[in-house]
Image (cartoon, rainbow, N blue to C red):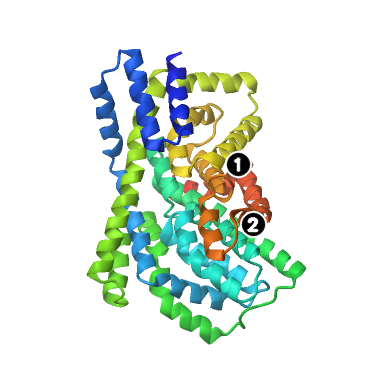
């Protein structure tokens, strides 16, 4: 009964439009008041302890690094290189869209960052070259999914902290699925280009490829520095995030001289605002998850699921459907923090590696960013493309096929996810 109060309190506050962080903390305080055995000071201590975590330092530093890269004009250099590398393919700028997102994912770490940064340039360029705005928005939204998959992925960092899993292994786990998503999207673009008669948008010129590579080589090295440094043991993921910020400042202030004190101050304040929002959610989810554990809700969920079926494939299917539905209504970061303490014990009970499940969870929830009613990526790109939210949803619908296809492959062929982590870290 007490667990029901906790869950009903949270979902009731959420339904009233109360912010996620406040809903989590409010439901926990309400539970403590009704239960009577938990002092309110314990809730405060648990919330403070939830954000007092060394791995969580990744969050502000990776956010700051991505914002600095955006502000310093590096996105244009990446886009020019992508045009030279993929503009000669059938479907030209749509292929460039995917290639650019692969590169930019190593700097943004989020789907929203990719859509708001490089995505803005891509949609406008495709519209000016005569592409259907719905198609332009659709492929840009779909390719933004590479941000949460390829390192340094912010959702994977949050999951790693919540599940007490290796962030380095999670970063490695996202590489193969991310590249697989990119390949499938490029194949989908090729098919649509043939059907709709889209040609190429640039001729392949080796000297142009070399020129844009030389112009963008320093920002292109960002993911290499982060992943290479962690792989070589030079620094931890947290230290890698700090290195990314230092490198972004080096490029923006010293090399390109596009970052002044005012720009750095503006970006820093924006980073503080975003980080504070995330950490409030983390603090609220810490006490909420602790109460779920003490009331043995997680154990009960394991029992309920295993009572329905003990087939691993069926439980994974139920988990996928559930996460996709949750992703329709709740953004990925709070959903990860809320659901990990509940769902991870079920996955461990059927022998699913926490790293494998982390990738499944993140991909499921991030697909929700492309679907109504939340669909924040669609809201951003619909505004850029000058189309309605409904048209944006129609534009991205065909690209759900490769995204869901890769999701199912990653779910039922765990070697795709675990191949790199197994070789690099174990």
Residue drawn 33% across the image and 19% down it = 32
Residue linked to disc 1: 411
In the image, residue 109 lies at what x, y percent? Answer: 43, 55
Q: Secondary structure at mark 1?
A: helix
Q: Nearer the viewer, residue 131 or 180?
A: 131
When the figure is inspected, residue 62 is found, relative to residue 320, above or below; the finding is below
What is the tally of numbered marks visible in this picture?
2
Work out whether 286 lies above or below 410.
Answer: above
Is residue 238 shown left or right of residue 424? left
Mark 1–mark 2 distance (CA, rounded to whole Å): 30 Å
Residue 81 screen position, x and y as percent: 50, 75
- The image position of residue 398, as x and y in percent, is 68, 55
Classed neighbour count for the residue bearing mark 1: other residues with Cα under 10 Å, few (<14), some (14–19), many (≥20):
many
Q: Which mark is residue 53?
A: none
Q: Is residue 35 left or right of residue 138?
A: left
Task: Kindly identify the residue that appears in the image at 43 percent across and 28 percent down.
Answer: 10
The residue indicated by pointer 2 is: 391
Foreground: disc 1 or disc 2: 2
User: Which residue appears at 50% of the width and 52% of the height?
Assistant: 149
Quadrant in which the C terminus is drawn: top left
Label 2: which secondary element: helix
Give residue 267's position: percent from left, percent from top: 30, 61
Q: Residues within 10 Å of mark 2 (few under 14, many from 20)?
A: some
> Can residue 425 be spotted in the picture?
no
241 vs 189, nearest the viewer: 189
- Residue sitting at x 49%, y 54%: 111
284 or 101, nearer to the observer = 284
């Amino acid at each position: 009964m007490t667990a029901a109060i906790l869950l009903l309190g949270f979902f009731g506050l959420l339904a009233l439009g109360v912010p996620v962080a406040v809903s989590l903390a409010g439901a926990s305080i309400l539970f403590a008041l009704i239960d009577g055995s938990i002092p309110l000071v314990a809730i405060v201590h648990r919330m403070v302890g939830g954000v007092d975590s060394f791995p969580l330092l990744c969050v502000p530093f990776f956010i700051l690094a991505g914002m600095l890269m955006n502000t310093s004009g590096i996105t244009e250099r990446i886009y020019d290189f992508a045009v030279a590398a993929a503009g000669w393919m059938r479907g030209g700028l749509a292929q460039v869209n995917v290639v650019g997102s692969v590169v930019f994912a190593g700097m943004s770490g989020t789907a929203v960052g990719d859509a708001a940064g490089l995505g803005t340039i891509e949609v406008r360029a495709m519209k000016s070259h005569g592409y259907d705005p719905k198609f332009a928005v659709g492929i840009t939204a779909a390719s933004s999914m590479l941000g949460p998959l390829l390192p340094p992925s912010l959702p994977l960092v949050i999951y790693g902290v919540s599940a007490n899993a290796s962030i380095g292994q999670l970063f490695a786990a996202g590489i193969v699925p991310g590249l697989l998503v990119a390949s499938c999207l490029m194949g989908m673009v090729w098919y649509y280009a043939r059907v709709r008669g889209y040609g190429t948008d640039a001729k392949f010129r080796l000297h142009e490829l070399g020129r844009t590579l030389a112009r963008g080589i320093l920002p292109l090295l960002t993911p290499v520095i982060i992943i290479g440094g962690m792989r070589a043991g030079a620094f931890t993921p947290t230290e890698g995030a700090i290195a990314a910020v230092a490198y972004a400042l080096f490029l923006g202030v010293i090399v390109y001289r596009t970052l002044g004190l005012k720009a750095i101050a503006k970006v820093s304040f924006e980073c503080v605002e975003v980080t504070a929002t995330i950490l409030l959610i983390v603090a609220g989810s810490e006490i909420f998850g602790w109460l779920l554990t003490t009331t043995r809700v997680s154990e009960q969920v394991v029992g309920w699921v295993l009572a329905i079926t003990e087939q691993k494939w069926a439980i994974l299917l139920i988990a996928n459907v559930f996460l996709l539905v949750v992703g329709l209504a709740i953004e990925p970061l709070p959903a990860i923090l809320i659901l990990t303490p509940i769902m991870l014990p079920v996955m461990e009970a059927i022998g699913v590696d926490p790293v494998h499940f982390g990738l499944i969870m993140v991909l499921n929830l991030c697909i929700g960013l492309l679907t109504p009613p939340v669909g924040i990526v669609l809201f951003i790109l619909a505004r850029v493309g000058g189309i309605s939210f409904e048209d944006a949803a129609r534009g991205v619908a065909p690209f759900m096929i490769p995204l869901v296809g890769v999701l199912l492959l990653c779910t039922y062929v765990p070697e795709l996810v675990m191949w790199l982590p197994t070789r690099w870290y174990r």
